Amino acid sequence: MKGKLLVLLVAIISAVLAGCSGGDDSSSGKDDKTVTVWAMGEEGKMLQEFSKKFEENSDYKVDVQAIPWDTAHDKLLTAVASGNGPDVVQLGTTWVAEFAEAGALKDLSEHMKDYPTFAKENFFEGAQSIMQYKDQIVGVPWYVDTRVLYYRKDLLKEVGYDQPPKTWEELKDAASKLADRGEGSYGLDIDMNDQSTPFIFAWQNGYEANLEENELNFDSPEFKGAIEYYTSFFREGISQSQQGKDIVQAFKDGSKPMFFSGPWMINIINDQAPDLEGKWATAVMPKKETNTSFMGGSIFSVFDSADNVDGALEYIAFMSQKDTQLKWTEVSSTLPAVKEAWKDPMMQENPLYVTFGKQLENAKAGLQTPKFERIAQELLATIERIVKGGADIEKELEKFNQTAQSILEK
């Protein structure tokens, strides 16, 4: 708590200094017919033009500010501290608990009856958990993503797999055989900077946290077994522990014929490796106890200091409509959060989308605690010491469990 207050104090000072220096105030000039939206990354850049569809059938105008992901967190903290934020804010799934805990997001519970598109049952189960923090509804899913297996069909066939690996045992076997093809060959690319992958393996191995009792359970056999499986790919030379060449190039030349990633890679591969057409595909995650994957994406929330709550609710309701979701998928290549949209031919007739639809039925969001980001980064640092430093797995996981519990309980 002390750390959070310190961060907020710094944010307040930053906001005051910015005001004194005549800096730009993105919320100035608001009126009751303008909905201000903060959206992140590439989606934010596209959203202003897309929002014209909302304006055509509404009395409201939309003012979108596109914010780079690498500065968004600090900007949001400043807005929380100063009370000078947007009406609608986009949040990544791992940020929701933090800003809900800080009181930055309006509780939408009283509005659920008036806006049927907000109903939890409209969304995948993994996304439903992101909407709620404690007893409040703090956001509505905008789009979703998850991780699946990308694989070279032709190269897997050469090592005896006509179908993608369906179990942990098959994944390890297929990856080992692919890595044995010769120097510079690997079987499975695992991004050691991706904080979702260790949790994916842990969930697949039966791991569960008990946040209601402040029990992370990182000392459980299920979690330890998952990290042992994860790190074994590096210890056995099946996966490359260094960054290596660009994954698209490695996928194209066959040196890394399998990897985990999200839907954005579909267009990237098609654009950068068109010669691979027909030679690659996607598959749901291989299974241990389950084949659970990570539920990513973004939600739209109403900022607690919003000047135009009614307009914000109307805008989010529009963005949650089935047809709007499908149109956004067309322009952004993100995946619809609304389950009904997945029944549309656009989603059903594309086998790559079909894979993601199946995986979204079994996907979980990161631990819904304000401390998730810090805990996840500690885990990645622990894994790096094991993989690159040769540290003892048992001892490192014991230290990690103690550190993570300390972070959670502060």
Image (cartoon, rainbow, N blue to C red):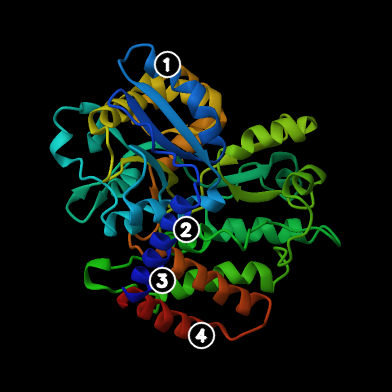
Q: Residue at x 77, y 30 (%)?
A: 274
- Nearest the eye: 139 or 258: 139
Q: Which residue is mark 4?
A: 394
Of callouts 1 and 2, which one flags the residue occurring earlier in the amino acid sequence? 1
Mark 3 → mark 1, Cα distance in angstroms: 48 Å
Residue 252 makes an appearance in the image: yes
What is the three-letter code of the residue carrying label 4?
Glu
Mark 1 crowdedness (10 Å alpha carbons): few <14, some 14-19, many ≥20: few
Q: Contact, CB < 8 Å: mark 2 with mark 4?
A: no
What is the three-letter code of the residue carrying label 3?
Glu
What is the three-letter code of the residue carrying label 1?
Lys
Q: Residue at x 78, y 49 (%)?
A: 250
Mark 2 crowdedness (10 Å alpha carbons): few <14, some 14-19, many ≥20: many
Q: Contact, CB < 8 Å: mark 2 with mark 3?
A: no
**Residue 401 occupies quadrant:** bottom left
Q: Contact, CB < 8 Å: mark 3 with mark 4?
A: no
Mark 3 → mark 4, Cα distance in angstroms: 13 Å
Q: Residue at x 44, y 22 (%)?
A: 51
- Nearest the eye: 177 or 58: 58
Of labels 4 and 1, the one closer to you: 1
Q: Along the horizontal axis of the image, is 387 left or right of 106?
A: right
Mark 2 → mark 3, Cα distance in angstroms: 12 Å
Mark 3 crowdedness (10 Å alpha carbons): few <14, some 14-19, many ≥20: some
Please state the horizontal and vertical placement of residue 199, each as a whole percent of the image: 46, 62
Q: Quadrant of the C terminus?
A: bottom left
Mark 1 → mark 2, Cα distance in angstroms: 37 Å
Q: Which residue is mark 1?
A: 53
